[in-house]
């Protein structure tokens, strides 16, 4: 089975109702594992109570911890605030243990024959150590997926350009897409024009996934495009819904489904997570998806 590595942050989302495991790469690994894929978070925890508790959570869900590193920095925390639409904003602790992920030669040698799929984002690149580590991982990855996840103030135009120049797939939300394409002088809300600009600017990119919140999502490549209106649910919060969307799209793509069908499943997955609290809710996935998708 293809190895999937999810590189970057692992942390506690500090919500009004209490703390929950989070961090986009960890969330993606969590959902990929639930879907039966061989996914591991490549990250770092602090040698503190919060770190030990997060490791226990991963083990309780049978998520591989073989690529978890430990250091003396504090385990990551994020203060999460929800608006009236239950959309999240984040106040992210810095520095945190996950800012210090190291890729030593032995690890790189072990990963090389696996030719893993690599999922990464922009937030982990706020540290120079992680940027160097990501560069090393790019050399062994067979498929590179950038889930951009812009978080103020931890990004700039140069970083985004560099990440997009070294990826095969881009997953981005509609607000991020409008912002990034405006850097290239494109002032429009036409999503197709925006996606095509990125495809034309970055020849390495094969496809773009655009999430639209409660308005569904879209898929773009150089030959085709598909959209799905999404599934209407009562939103509890949006934390991690985009991560679960990406996990499902990747899982279905690896199983051989068409992009249009992958998008349909991914939208159902994202809606199912948004209808529950936190990024890694425990629920019976099959019936939840079937109930939503039966209305298509």
Image (cartoon, rainbow, N blue to C red):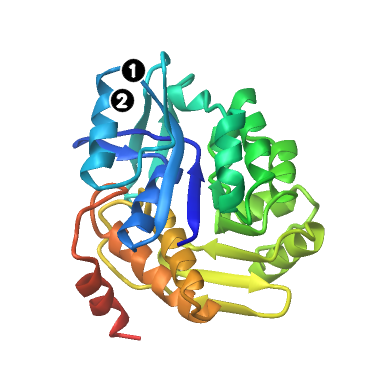
229 w.r.t. 200: above or below: below
280 w.r.t. 258: above or below: above
| Residue on which disc 1 sits | 47
Place of residue 129 in the rendered image (x, y in percent of width and height, measured from the top left): 61, 24
The answer to whether any part of residue 261 appears in the image is yes
Q: Is residue 246 left or right of residue 21?
A: right
Question: Which quadrant would the C terminus be assigned to in this image?
Answer: bottom left
Q: Helix or strand or loop: what does disc 1 sit on?
A: loop
Q: Helix or strand or loop: what does disc 2 sit on?
A: helix
Q: Quadrant of residue 11?
A: top left
Q: Residue at x 41, y 13 (%)?
A: 72
Q: Residue at x 40, y 35 (%)?
A: 10
72 w.r.t. 24: above or below: above
Place of residue 270 in the rendered image (x, y in percent of width and height, measured from the top left): 37, 62
The answer to whether any part of residue 154 appears in the image is no
Mark 1 in CB contact with mark 2 (< 8 angstroms) = yes
Place of residue 281 in the rendered image (x, y in percent of width and height, measured from the top left): 24, 52
Question: How far apart are labels 1 and 2 at the CA level?
Answer: 6 Å
Which disc number belongs to residue 246? none
Q: Residue at x 56, y 52 (%)?
A: 114
Q: Is residue 186 left or right of residue 124?
A: right
| Residue on which disc 2 sits | 51
């Amino acid at each position: 089975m293809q190895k999937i590595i999810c590189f970057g942050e692992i942390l506690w989302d500090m919500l009004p109702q209490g703390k929950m495991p989070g961090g986009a790469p960890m969330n993606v690994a969590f959902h990929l594992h639930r879907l039966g894929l061989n996914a591991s978070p490549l990250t770092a925890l602090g040698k503190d109570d919060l770190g030990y508790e997060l490791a226990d959570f991963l083990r309780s869900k049978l998520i591989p911890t073989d690529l978890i590193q430990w250091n003396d920095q504090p385990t990551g925390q994020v203060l999460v605030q929800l608006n009236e639409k239950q959309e999240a904003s984040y106040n992210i602790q810095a520095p945190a243990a996950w800012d210090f992920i190291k890729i030593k030669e032995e690890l790189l040698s072990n990963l090389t024959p696996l030719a893993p799929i690599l999922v990464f984002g922009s937030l982990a690149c706020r540290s120079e150590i992680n940027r160097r580590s990501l560069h090393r991982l790019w050399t062994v990855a067979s498929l590179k997926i950038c889930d951009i996840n812009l978080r103020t103030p931890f990004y700039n135009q140069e970083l985004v350009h560099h990440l997009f120049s070294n990826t095969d797939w881009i997953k981005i939300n509609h607000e991020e897409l409008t912002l990034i394409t405006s850097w290239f002088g494109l002032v429009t809300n036409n999503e197709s024009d925006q996606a095509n600009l990125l495809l034309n600017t970055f020849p390495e990119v094969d496809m773009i996934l655009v999430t639209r919140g409660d308005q569904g999502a879209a898929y773009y490549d150089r030959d085709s495009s598909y959209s799905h209106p999404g599934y209407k649910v009562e939103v509890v919060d949006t934390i991690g819904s985009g991560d679960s969307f990406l996990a499902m799209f990747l899982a279905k793509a690896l199983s051989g489904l068409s992009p249009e069908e992958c998008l349909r499943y991914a939208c159902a997955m994202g809606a199912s997570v948004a209808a529950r609290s936190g990024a890694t809710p425990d629920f019976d996935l099959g019936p939840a998806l079937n109930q939503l998708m039966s209305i298509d």
